[in-house]
Image: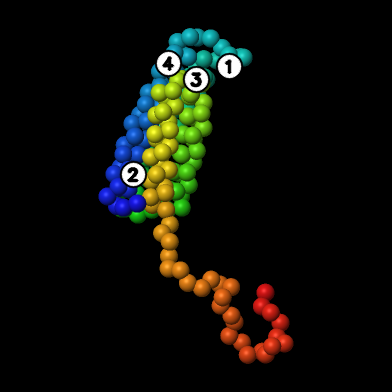
Amino acid sequence: MSTVVRRPVAFVAAIVLFVEAVGIVLINGIMATVVKNQDMSLAGLESDAMSSGTWVMGGVFGLYLLLSGLVLLLTGIRDRAPGRIGRIALITCAVVHGVLGALTVGLVGWAAFGFMMVVLGLIVLTLVAYGPRPGPVGPGPEAVRPADDAGPNAPAPI
């Protein structure tokens, strides 16, 4: 894939993840407020604990999406593949979007599923576009023989 296409894909994916991070934090904030205002307990767990847990979960997931978006943004700016940690973050982000997409189709609807699959596609397209480049084709390691003159009765190298 050419630079003309892969850089904009990385930028669009980064912007989408930034917007999604803000949306996740807002949705979790709304859910935390609703749970706190209910003033009910769930199996003995107080509403304050559930509200705090929802805020923490939203914050951690929002930071995770921001980190993944930052990796994509830096990938687009530098026009280089992300490093090992960045690639792992993007792969896990793609897996999370695939799993959440499968869950949202039944719980939220096809529009949410479509959004999750578009984000998944943008992340995977960026990973593939900035994947390893094929190097020059040459003899493999099995074609190279050791340079020893031990003779025909020498033991084979291990």
Give the structural element (helix, strand or loop) at label 4: helix
Residue bearing mark 4: 33
Q: Image quadrant of residue 18?
A: top left
Pointers 4 and 1 in contact (C-beta within 8 Å) = no
How many C-alpha atoms fall within 10 Å of the one at disc 1: few (<14), some, or many (≥20)?
few
Percent across and percent down for residue 126 are 38, 46
Give the structural element (helix, strand or loop) at label 2: helix
- The residue under label 3 is which amino acid type? Leu
Residue bearing mark 3: 107
N-terminal label among 4 and 3: 4
Determine the residue positioned at 48% across, 24% down. Answer: 104
Depth check: give the residue in front, 15 or 135. Answer: 135
Residue 108 in view: yes
The C terminus: image quadrant: bottom right
Residue bearing mark 2: 10
Residue 52 in view: no
Give the structural element (helix, strand or loop) at label 3: helix
N-terminal label among 3 and 1: 1
Which of the numbered marks, if any, corresponds to residue 80?
A: none
Determine the residue positioned at 51% across, 21% down. Answer: 106
How many C-alpha atoms fall within 10 Å of the one at disc 3: few (<14), some, or many (≥20)?
few
Colour scheme in use: rainbow
Which of the numbered marks, if any, corresponds to residue 45?
A: 1
